[in-house]
Image: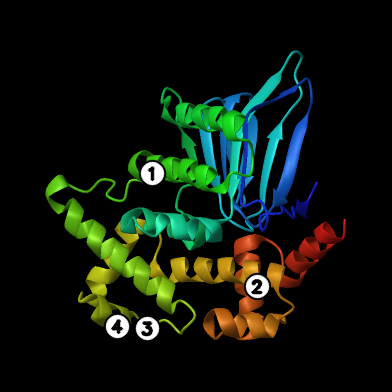
Amino acid sequence: MNRIMPLDLETKPVRFSNRTETVDEHWLMYHAHQGCELLYIFEGEGSITVEGVTYPLRPGTLVCFQPYQLHKVEVPSRPNGTYIRSNLTFDPRFMEAYAAPFPKLHAFARRLWKGVLVRQVFDLAGDDRIPALFADFGKSQEVWGEGATDEEALHVLAVLRYLQLYVFPAEDAVPPDRADKTASHAETMLDWVESRFREPFVLETMANDCHLSPFHVSRLFKSLVGKTISDYIAARRVREACELLARTDRTTREIGIEVGALGASYFCQMFKKHKGVTPQAYRTMVRRAYER
């Protein structure tokens, strides 16, 4: 199975299923869709592949998939084998208004939506907070049913807050006396990239705008984000291109120009390096999925 899944997130911006169970079946899903997806594993063993890297799937695994990101989940069939998971998928555009009153949470939500995540697979075995949040979500749905968008949005905010505080800490490995200042630098740099990634990148311009030296910007960005600035911008451009390929009829040349003033040949090489397929092949997968 290899497809872009056309979820109806326009009329139903939040989809949640708690403790879905599959028994004695080889489970294989290889797809992408336009929403942010959180997958938590209660029972089962197999593998998860995202961005070309394969991770073990086992109880306690939490995975965050970004919009239009191809991913494969496979759980081989075993005698009396059970695969139990909870799945939360939401339209990040829908969550913008609900997260806006909370600046740090809003910035974090946009990072999950549009940023380049260094880690997407987490071992949370022994931490019962995410199962408790999902259990509460499921109980609430039993009371007010699916489609109660305000109530669902509040539950999504609670899950995002948990991720922000305990799964994606902004100040990993930063001494407490430097945490606030370092986090501020990180937010400034990531905001700068988000607003300027479509333009040709000039390190000196970024350094001046962030009030840091070019050397300090490069070193600090790599230590905080786990990627060089150039690699991060390339990945961000590819993520933007995936959405444009999926949602518009613009040509490869036009998309290359829009996401970074890139020539068609260079853009295609960069896209294939990150996604493993050409832009046109990616778009074909999208169109075939929607035709089905």
- Which label belongs to residue 288? none
N-term-proximal mark, 1 vs 4: 1
Q: Is label 4 or label 2 in front? A: 2
Element carrying mark 3? loop
List x then y, in percent, for residue 162.
39, 39
N-term-proximal mark, 3 vs 2: 3
Q: Is label 3 or label 2 in front? A: 2
Q: Disc 1 and disc 2: Cα gap in Å?
A: 29 Å
Residue type, numbered disc 2: Leu
The residue at which mark 2 appears reads as 244
The residue at which mark 1 appears reads as 161
Residue 229 occupies which quadrant of the picture? Answer: bottom left
Q: Please say if the residues under marks 3 and 4 sit with CB atoms less than 8 Å apart.
A: yes
The residue at which mark 4 appears reads as 204
Q: Is residue 21 above or below residue 243?
A: above
Drawn side of residue 115 relative to residue 27, left or right: left
N-term-proximal mark, 3 vs 1: 1
N-term-proximal mark, 1 vs 2: 1
289 or 148, which lies in front? Answer: 148
Q: Please say if the residues under marks 1 and 4 sit with CB atoms less than 8 Å apart.
A: no
Q: Residue at x 30, y 57 (%)?
A: 223
- Which label belongs to residue 202? 3
Q: Name the quarter where the C terminus is drawn.
A: bottom right
Element carrying mark 4? helix
Residue type, numbered disc 1: Arg
Element carrying mark 1? helix
List x then y, in percent, for residue 144.
59, 35
Q: Is residue 183 above or below residue 195?
A: above
Residue type, numbered disc 4: Glu
Drawn side of residue 59 relative to residue 272, left or right: left
Residue count near mark 4 (Cα–Cα under 10 Å), binned few <14, some 14–19, many ≥20: some
Q: Residue at x 76, y 72 (%)?
A: 280
